[in-house]
Amino acid sequence: MKELIKLFLAFARIGGLTFGGGYAMLPMLQREAVEKQGWVTEEELMDYYAVGQCIPGVIAVNTATFIGNKAKGFAGAVAASLGVIFPSLVIIIAIAAFIQSFSELEIVQNAFAGIRVGVCVLIFSAVAKLFKKAVVDKFTLGLFAVVLALSVFTKISPILFVILAALAGIIVQVFIQKGGSAK
Amino acid sequence: MIYLQLFWEFFKTGLFTVGGGLASLPFLYEISDKTGWYSHAQLADMIAISESTPGPIGINMATYVGFTSAGIFGSIIASIGFIIPPLIIATIVSRFLKKFSENKFVKGAFYGLRAVSVALVCSALVSVIKISLINVPLFSETKNFFDLISIPGIVLAAACWFLLKKKNPHPVVILGMSAAAGILMGLLNFI
């Protein structure tokens, strides 16, 4: 039980002190899970982090689950995951309640009109970075263009795109390119 | 029963979100269209808050959407629903970690998934642009090109982009600057 509380608190610290999501979390993870507690080794952490990025779900929760599992089994995974979401719950509920009571004010509405423009720029910058890593050949470029057009102009569920993209990726890489590097 | 529906919607979102918090956006737009719990404009504001507070963006979004849809209990239900699929999947994968990441089927799947993940984030970008930089309803009424594009918005976006490229500041700096510009333009009757 003591170990579970330790896991919860360590991951609550990590969740509460990192801005910008999963990618910004690595230095804190190194300090808490490797150096301070010795739950995992540096190499294990890098493996978790790499695999955590390429399975479904939030990267932070994936990494917390891996480390929790290693330290204390499934109960440890639950404790670590709950820890990582706890600060978000508290902070966001406080802000959301605050904004709800002031959203009628003209100054708040103007501020958010400006903020939405800033959000566009931030998402654009994220897209530009992801694009370089994900769109590496003609096939991925085609997939990108088709899915973008369909999701902007139709109401098809993104779930369908995700399933078909995984299948298409397997077919192209395993059966057509025979596992060789993409051209 | 809104709590059950909220749980189910976020369970699905957690299961199919690949590649970080922003990749959950298309799912959140779909929930908005389907249920009317919150508007596209509210969602854009939630993105801003989620980017400028600590914690993973995906979790912040789930908490915020849950709160807007169904109060404090809603925010807890949405966040829990959102983390159950990764909790289960990561626990299974952790049993055979090395084999998993070197498996050719897994590699193939992610070759396709990464491209679609960017496309989906990009379509979320289009949705945010529609409520911040361009005004399609006004344009289809007047057919005047200058009614389509918000000039102050474009200038602000260019300024943010320039700052981001030159200084690489924390997102909260960009958003604070945009908020100040929004208030200022409101005072000058620009928007």
Image: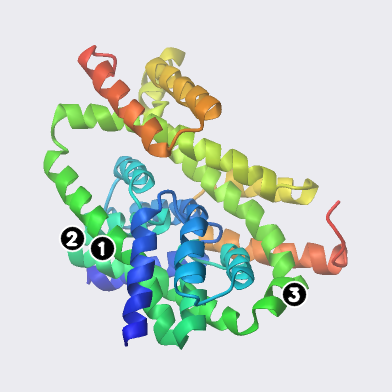
| Image height of B174 relative to B103, above or below | above
| Residue in the foreground of this view, choosing between B60 and A47 | A47
Q: Can residue B6 be seen in this view?
A: no
Q: Name the residue under label 3.
A: B103
Up-down relation of residue A122 to residue A56 (above or below) = above
Relative image position of residue A70 (x, y in whole percent): 52, 82
Q: What element carries label 3?
A: loop
* Above or below A128: residue A155: below
The x and y percentages for residue A110 are 24, 27
Mark 2 neighbour class, 10 Å CA radius: few under 14, some 14 to 19, many 20 or more: some
How packed mark 3 is, by other alpha carbons closer than 10 Å (few <14, some 14-19, many 20 or more), is few
- The reply to the same-chain question for discs 2 and 1 is yes
- Give the residue drawn at x 18%, y 60%: B71
**Chain identity of mark 3:** B
Evaluate if marks 2 and 1 touch, with contact meaning CB atoms under 8 Å apart: yes
Q: Which residue lies furthest to the front in this view?
A: A36
Q: In this view, does A36 lie to the left or right of B19?
A: left
Which label belongs to residue B71?
Answer: 2
Q: Is residue B73 left or right of residue A123?
A: left
Is B190 rendered above or below residue A59? above
Quadrant in the rendering for residue A44: bottom right
In the depicted view, which residue is nearer to us: A11 or B1? A11
Q: Distance between the residues labelled 2 and 3?
A: 43 Å
Work out whether mark 1 precedes mark 3 in sequence or the reverse, and give the earlier one: 1
Mark whose residue sits in front, 2 or 3: 3
Name which residue type carries label 2. Gly
Residue under circle 1? B75
Q: Which chain carries label 2?
A: B
Say which amino acid is labelled 1.
Answer: Ser
Q: Are marks 1 and 3 in contact (CB under 8 Å)?
A: no
